[in-house]
Amino acid sequence: MDLGDPDLYLDPGRFARWRGHAAADAVLWSEAGTSPGGFWSVFSLAACRAILAPKAPFTSEYGMMIGFDRDHPDKAGGGMLVVADGPQHGRLRSVIMPFLSRAMAESLDDVVRQEVRRLVADAVSAGGVDVAASLGPVIPASVVCRILGVPADDRDMLIELTNHAFGGADDTFDRMSPEAAHSEMILYLADLVADRRRSPGDDLISALAADSRFDLREVLLNCDNVLVGGNETTRHAIAGCFHALATSPGTLAGLRADPGLVGPVVEEVIRWTSPAMHVLRVATADVDLPGQRVSTGEAVVAWLPAANRDPRHFVAPDEFRPGRTANHLGFGYGPHHCLGAALARLELRALLLALAEFAGAVAVLGEPVPLRSNLVHGYRHLQVRLEPVGRPANHREALS
């Protein structure tokens, strides 16, 4: 079986497969297909951590997703944060991290909460919404564009491009290839970089453009990385938050009674949704995995949703249980742990508190339609009904 086949992840049976592979500590080989050289897969929480650990004998520089390997490397390798190791990773991280940090998230807290309250109030007043098409993409795009310094008028255009960049296997996004979408984003970002070099601001594009250690290619690659990474996974966690709440009717009432409980709910949303589906590494030495030796140069894929449903670590892993201990891999692990984790938590916290304020209940209408992808675990469509709580019925009055 080629575990890179995106059609496998349209099947609700994926959860049982992931759970079974994680419980068995399976190490499976996929022959050449979606990846030209084939790849190994690991699924358990322990095995995924072992692959991604700081001193593990693996590299990200050949690429971080299925399709790349030692003989077919990512051209961005060594130049973009997610596919850089060693000193270059440290240099890039030192510039990018302050813009994605917990301190930055705290500075944005008020503006994000107000924007999310407005969006949720409108959705509740309307009675419901397709969250995969509306709230899901809009909230993270607003945050990441603010950090990069992208004009608000350009956000919808960039949402469309990121859809194609990471949703290219789904026929919803077949107007252009992922490569073409990335190319358009690079051209757009090149204009912004040129503008910031003439008139610097306090945004991430200005900081990267002003750093003499990075050439134009590296600046553009990392702006693209932050733009796509900040939009594409969090939007599906946001959509999945509605799905999760529909399975756990008491959660919003609990948050209304005690908003201080929001932290553990955020962590469980991240575990349960697991929007980053896989991470690929290439072995830099022969290494023993459970029951299998992996040779130098072979690619290994860590399936993060499987790790986050490992039944040896999570009781009833398919259930949404906000009281769990937060030991998930929703943001990865090791040196490439997601730099935007604090911002994703900020957005989900704002969403949950706004839903607790305005929505009495969430119900999914019809069957959720998953995204056809082996990289992003998300939704093509998720139509929900939102029952209002309290007064006023038109929740815009509560915003004044």
Image (cartoon, rainbow, N blue to C red):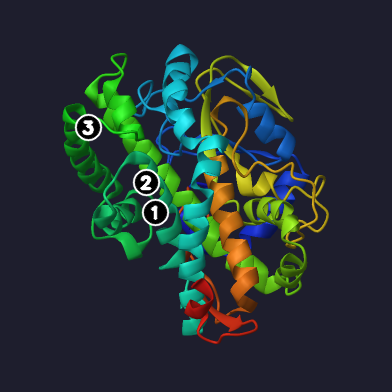
Q: In front here: 19 or 189?
A: 189
> In terms of sequence position, does the residue under pointer 1 or pointer 3 come before the other?
1
Residue 132 visible in the displayed image? no
Q: Percent x, y for residue 115? A: 45, 61
Q: Mark 2: which amino acid?
A: Arg
Q: Mark 1: which amino acid?
A: Ser
> Mark 1 and mark 2: span between their CA atoms?
6 Å
Residue 362 visible in the displayed image? yes
Classify residue 341 as left or right of residue 375.
Answer: right
> Mark 1 and mark 3: span between their CA atoms?
20 Å
SS assignment at label 2:
helix
> In terms of sequence position, does the residue under pointer 2 or pointer 3 come before the other?
2
SS assignment at label 3:
helix
Q: Residue at x 32, y 26 (%)?
A: 208
SS assignment at label 1:
helix
Q: In front here: 235 or 282?
A: 235
Classify residue 40 as left or right of residue 222.
Answer: right
Q: Residue at x 52, y 28 (%)?
A: 281
Q: In front here: 290 or 80?
A: 80
Q: Percent x, y for residue 297? A: 50, 20
Which residue is the site of mark 1?
Answer: 142
Which residue is the site of mark 3?
Answer: 196
Which residue is the site of mark 2?
Answer: 146
Asked which quadrant contains residue 365, the reply is bottom right
Q: Mark 3: which amino acid?
A: Arg
